[in-house]
């Protein structure tokens, strides 16, 4: 999620959308990436985990160097490529940790957590399509929207639930519709601003939902 958010923030800064908030979010997200890496480095990961962490660190170093410079149209495409490399490395590490861990995360928890990344990925690609007229980014919009919608439907139909989860899913559905509206109005300043607001709101919503799903799982297991 952070890999996609940081690219989206770079595009947001270049487009002049809520610049002050974007700068704060860039700093916070950069610090959070480093905190995650520092924490992972303290764990006993095993050979596969250590190798995967090295790949993530290398990918992050490449992205961090570019983020430190002032965003430009030419540099934004490279930032996006580095962000995609970090996303792939992070997902590979997640798989390595799950394979070596004592317990495998419940599928529904993983689906919920990945919605944060999809919201940022969609907003990032929409801003890149608008800012760079990037056809590859525009081509990814519909597939990402379809993935998000399919995952949201699966969460809504899942038997693992609680009053908090049901209310959170209603909030997520409403915010998702606003994000889709922002994509549809991509060529307007209002649409791009909606993209930014709704993608961040969805991150917050799905972070809460992920916590509630994990709590429900712990209750069942106990």
Image (spheres, rainbow, N blue to C red):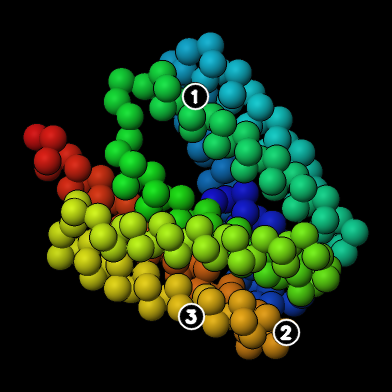
Disc on the earlier residue, 1 or 3: 1
Query: Relative to residue 182, is residue 65 depicted above or below?
Result: above
Q: Dividing the picture into quarters, in which one does residue 136 lie?
A: bottom right
Q: Is residue 46 left or right of residue 64?
A: left
Marks 2/1: CA distance?
41 Å
Give the number of the disc on residue 178.
3
Dot 3, crowdedness within 10 Å: few (<14), some or many (≥20)? some
The outermost residue toward the left is 222
Q: In terms of secondary structure, where does tag 2 sit? A: loop
**Nearest the eye: 79 or 145:** 145
Give the number of the disc on residue 119.
none
Residue at left 42%, top 75%? 175
Residue at left 62%, top 34%? 89
Query: What residue does disc 2 label?
Result: 187
Where does residue 97 sit, x and y in percent of width and height? 45, 25
Query: Relative to residue 156, is residue 130 depicted above or below?
Result: below
- Can see residue 197? yes
Query: Relative to residue 98, is residue 143 depicted above or below?
Result: below
Where does residue 116 sit, x and y in percent of width and height? 47, 56
Where, quadrant-wise, is the C terminus in this rendering? top left
Q: In terms of secondary structure, where does tag 1 sit? A: helix
The outermost residue toward the right is 74
Disc on the earlier residue, 3 or 2: 3
Query: What residue does disc 1 label?
Result: 96
Q: Is residue 37 left or right of residue 26?
A: left
Q: Dividing the picture into quarters, in which one does residue 53 lie?
A: top right
């Amino acid at each position: 999620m952070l890999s996609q958010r940081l690219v989206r923030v770079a595009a947001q800064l270049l487009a002049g959308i809520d610049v002050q908030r974007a700068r704060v979010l860039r700093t916070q997200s950069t610090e959070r990436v480093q905190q995650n890496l520092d924490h992972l480095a303290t764990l006993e990961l095993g050979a596969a985990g250590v190798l995967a962490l090295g790949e993530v660190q290398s990918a992050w170093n490449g992205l961090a160097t570019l983020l430190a410079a002032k965003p430009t149209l030419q540099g934004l495409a490279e930032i996006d490529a580095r962000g995609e490399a970090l996303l792939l490395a992070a997902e590979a590490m997640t798989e390595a940790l799950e394979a070596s861990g004592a317990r495998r995360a419940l599928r529904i928890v993983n689906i919920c957590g990945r919605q944060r990344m999809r919201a940022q990925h969609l907003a990032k690609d929409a801003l890149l399509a608008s800012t760079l007229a990037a056809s590859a980014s525009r081509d990814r919009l519909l597939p990402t929207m379809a993935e998000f919608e399919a995952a949201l439907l699966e969460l809504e139909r899942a038997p693992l639930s609680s009053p908090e989860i049901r209310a959170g899913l209603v909030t997520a559905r409403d915010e998702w519709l606003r994000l889709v509206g922002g994509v549809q109005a991509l060529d307007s300043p209002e649409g791009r601003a909606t993209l930014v607001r709704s993608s961040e709101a969805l991150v917050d919503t799905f972070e809460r939902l992920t916590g509630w799903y994990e709590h429900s799982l712990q209750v069942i297991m106990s």
